[in-house]
Image (cartoon, rainbow, N blue to C red):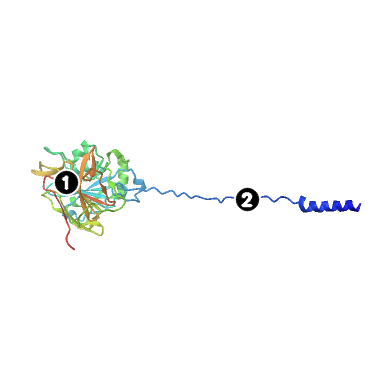
Amino acid sequence: MKKVLALILCAVIALALFGCSKKEEPTTTAAPTTTTTTTTKAPEYINPLTGEKDYNKGAVDVRPVAIVVENLRPARPQWGIGSSDIIVEGEVEGGISRMLWLYADYTSVPEKIGPIRSARPSYVRFSEYFDAIYIHWGGSHSRSNYTGGYETIKKDNVDDIDGMRGGVLFGRDRTRSVSSEHRGILNGKKLPQVIKDKGFRTALDKESFSVLNFNESVVDAGNEKAEKIGAKFSSRTDTRRFTYKDGKYHSTDWEKDVAFQNVILLMDETKYITTPYKGSSTTYLNYLYKGHDGYYASNGTQTKIRWEIKDNKLYLTDLSGNPLKINPGKSYIGLCSSNNSGKVTFSNPEN
């Protein structure tokens, strides 16, 4: 009996030590969780006339405006000069020049610019190359073999705003002791409402807009230095002068320092047309926009270029026919006569 009890006790002890212990489960380690953060790059809105970033999103694919500003000495310094994206300048009549100021974003036009002056056919046509709303104060009329500014507007069905019709947009500055034609100003802050009230199309017609191609950053225009530039529109006009300093081309010809990143000078065939006017005669100059050679200067250098008007748009190319890339920033475009002694000069005076 004692032997049996001893065997039972041994069995109980063995069961307690081995049989009742649970097999240990293998330990598993979870794979680390990797979190990937995707950053969406904010879209870049670029000014189509300057190539500069941080452009007004609300002005993307919206029509620009082209505003006629005079250039006679009693008008200088012009109110708001240097505020536009592009200044276009050339001869009109009597050896005088006139300017066309282009703003890509018409909500950015300053509260006071001018003096606003009358329409000429060459400037109406240039505004069309950028699908712009044309703003002027008066205009020339057709006489004899001359087609006037007003008739060009009507013939080409150009959306225009004319100071001769009055309205809240136009006024006269009374701080200068000059005749009234040199004091006509435009209130840019009222321009968006006036455009809306007139019911003009504001969506840009991309098929009618001359695309300018821009570099990502400022680079040399060419291999030739160009510290000083002179642009003479014809034998009858004075010379527009620019000096390169601090990375820009500066001109003080308007009695105020105005700076441009780019100077683009286009040689074009011109035609003088003499018509009777108030008992005498007036000789108008028309740009024929036939295309020709030209010059592009930026970053203290210059190169020869070519240009043409095709499908009512302006195309700038290098001498190989490739689209010309210009530097981001404001531009001056001078129109010089290729057949009436227009002239472009470059100089590099010793320091």
* Numbered circle sitting on residue 267: 1
Q: Amino acid at mark 1?
A: Met
Residue occupying the far top of the picture: 155
Most foreground residue, 197 or 302:
302
Identify the residue at image location x=91%, y=51%.
Answer: 1
Most foreground residue, 199 or 153:
153
Q: Is residue 81 left or right of residue 6?
A: left
- Cα–Cα gap, marks 1 and 2: 81 Å
Image location of residue 203, percent across then percent down: 32, 40
Callout 2: few (<14), some (14-19), or many (20+) C-alpha neighbours within 10 Å?
A: few
Identify the residue at image location x=34%, y=46%.
Answer: 59
The residue that label 2 is drawn on is 28
In the rendered image of this protein, does residue 79 appear above or below residue 281?
Answer: below
In the rendered image of this protein, does residue 29 appear above or below residue 272?
Answer: below
Residue occupying the far bottom of the picture: 351
Identify the residue at image location x=83%, y=53%.
Answer: 10
- Give the mark, 1 or 2, whose residue is nearer the N terminus: 2
Kindly state the secondary structure of the residue where label 2 is placed: loop
Is residue 205 in sight in this rendering?
A: no
* Numbered circle sitting on residue 21: none
Q: Is residue 331 left or right of residue 148?
A: right
Most foreground residue, 263 or 188:
263
Image location of residue 96, percent across then percent down: 14, 49
Image location of residue 102, percent across then percent down: 26, 47
Residue occupying the far right of the picture: 1
